[in-house]
Image (spheres, rainbow, N blue to C red):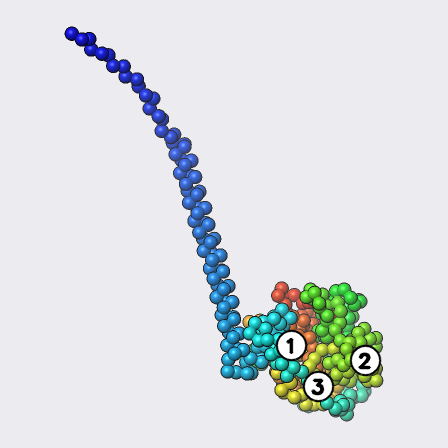
């Protein structure tokens, strides 16, 4: 009888499971990974929505531009093109759908040369000893009331799609042109110009050379005469607005020699000329875009009108040249010239800015000069 074989059973060690602490750590890791994945999806979706929105707005903008340029209305096309050309940052936009020749053709239709000499007999400066002529309400011949008797009248202006601000200086001898401490570097803001000259207020003046696009305002553009000194002779003929020694505003297309003959002591270049010898210039030559505007004018009694209109903002889209002309004619302007507009448009009075600057950061930009008053 065979002996039974003994079977030896070797017990294998039973692996131990994760500890409770390890399980908690694993759950936390999973939760953190899940949160990261969720956050990543949210961020991806957020930036995806922004990208799609930007693309949609871009396409909508291109579509709108196409409709304006290729649509049935030549007036809308011209307004759009001129608005872009008058805006330093967006001068390239019309070329998306138009050739350079087509853009220049539209621009050339809006260039103006006025004919004939300025009629100085239309400006009759009152003698210093004369009292202002007013009616029983205290209003002068132009319906203005100098309530505090300081010779300065401020008014709010409004029109279709825009708001503006007007200051009338009854004595033109109080108006002059201010400049930075020197030319070639940075200009000064209008507030800084007023502080430098201890001026009560003023508006921005002429344009400036800005080849780099930095907007430093340190180099005046065109004929520039300040306190009898010529700082830039400009081109052969400049669209110009300047006061002679008697306080009469001359507007036109002048060379430096012309300015000397007229005894100009303070004046700057910009344009176009808006009103000449009591009449608006050719309306066809004043077709323009809608933008912030600055203008200077003179009434028949010598009073100087300074006007600014806000633009490129929710409360005020901006104005055309024709809007500015109508406002100035309604207030008795005999001669008027447009000044630098856009982000340069500023008015300062009694220690504060009157208008809202349309610059990207909302701050007033450095200027090469400004028409100020004491």
**Precedes in sequence: disc 3 or disc 1:** 3
Residue 113 disc label: 3
Image: 343 above or below 327: above
Q: Nearer the viewer, mark 3 or mark 1?
A: 3
Q: How many marks?
A: 3
Disc 1: which residue: 293
Q: Tag 3's secondary structure?
A: loop
- Within 10 Å of disc 1 (Cα), the crowding (few <14, some 14-19, many 20+) is many
Question: How far apart in space, not on screen, are marks 3 and 2 (Cα)?
Answer: 17 Å
Please state if 213 lies on the left or on the right of 117 as rendered: left
Residue appearing at x 81%, y 83% in the figure: 258
From this viewpoint, is residue 255 visible? Answer: yes
Query: Label 2, on which residue?
Result: 256
Q: Tell me where residue 353 appears, x and y as whole percent.
A: 67, 70
Sequence-first disc among 2 and 1? 2
Distance from label 3 to label 1 (Cα)? 21 Å
List the single residue furthest toward the bottom. Answer: 121
Viewer-side residue, 54 vs 129: 54
């Amino acid at each position: 009888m065979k002996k039974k074989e003994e079977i030896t059973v070797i017990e294998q060690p039973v692996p131990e499971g994760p500890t409770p602490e390890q399980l908690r750590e694993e759950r936390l890791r999973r939760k953190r990974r899940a949160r990261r994945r969720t956050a990543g999806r949210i961020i991806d979706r957020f930036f995806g929505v922004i990208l799609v929105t930007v693309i949609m707005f871009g396409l909508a903008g291109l579509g709108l531009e196409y409709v304006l340029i290729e649509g049935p209305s030549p007036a809308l096309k011209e307004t759009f093109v001129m608005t872009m050309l008058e805006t330093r940052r967006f001068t390239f936009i019309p070329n998306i759908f138009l050739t350079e020749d087509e853009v220049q053709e539209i621009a050339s239709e809006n260039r103006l040369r006025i004919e004939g000499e300025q009629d100085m007999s239309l400006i009759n400066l009152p003698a210093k000893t004369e009292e202002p002529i007013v009616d029983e309400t205290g209003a002068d011949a132009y319906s203005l009331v100098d309530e505090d008797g300081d010779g300065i009248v401020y008014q709010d202006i409004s029109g279709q799609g825009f708001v503006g601000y007007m200051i009338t200086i009854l004595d033109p001898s109080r108006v002059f042109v201010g400049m930075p401490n020197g030319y070639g570097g940075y200009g000064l803001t209008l507030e800084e110009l007023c502080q430098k000259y201890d001026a009560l207020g003023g508006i921005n003046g002429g344009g400036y050379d800005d080849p780099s696009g930095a907007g430093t305002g340190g180099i005046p553009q065109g004929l520039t005469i300040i306190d009898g000194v010529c700082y830039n002779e400009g081109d052969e003929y400049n669209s110009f607005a300047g006061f002679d020694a008697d306080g009469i505003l001359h507007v036109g297309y002048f060379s430096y020699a012309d300015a000397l003959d007229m005894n100009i002591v303070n004046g700057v270049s910009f344009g176009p000329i808006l009103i000449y010898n009591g009449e608006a210039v050719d309306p066809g030559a004043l077709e323009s875009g809608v933008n912030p505007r600055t203008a200077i004018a003179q009434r028949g009694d010598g009073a100087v009108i300074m006007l600014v209109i806000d633009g490129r903002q929710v409360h005020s889209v901006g104005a055309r040249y024709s809007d500015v002309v109508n406002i100035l004619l309604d207030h008795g302007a005999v001669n008027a010239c447009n000044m630098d507009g856009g982000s340069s448009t500023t008015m300062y009075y009694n220690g504060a800015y009157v208008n809202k600057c349309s610059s990207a950061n909302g701050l007033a930009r450095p200027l090469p000069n400004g028409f100020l008053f004491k």
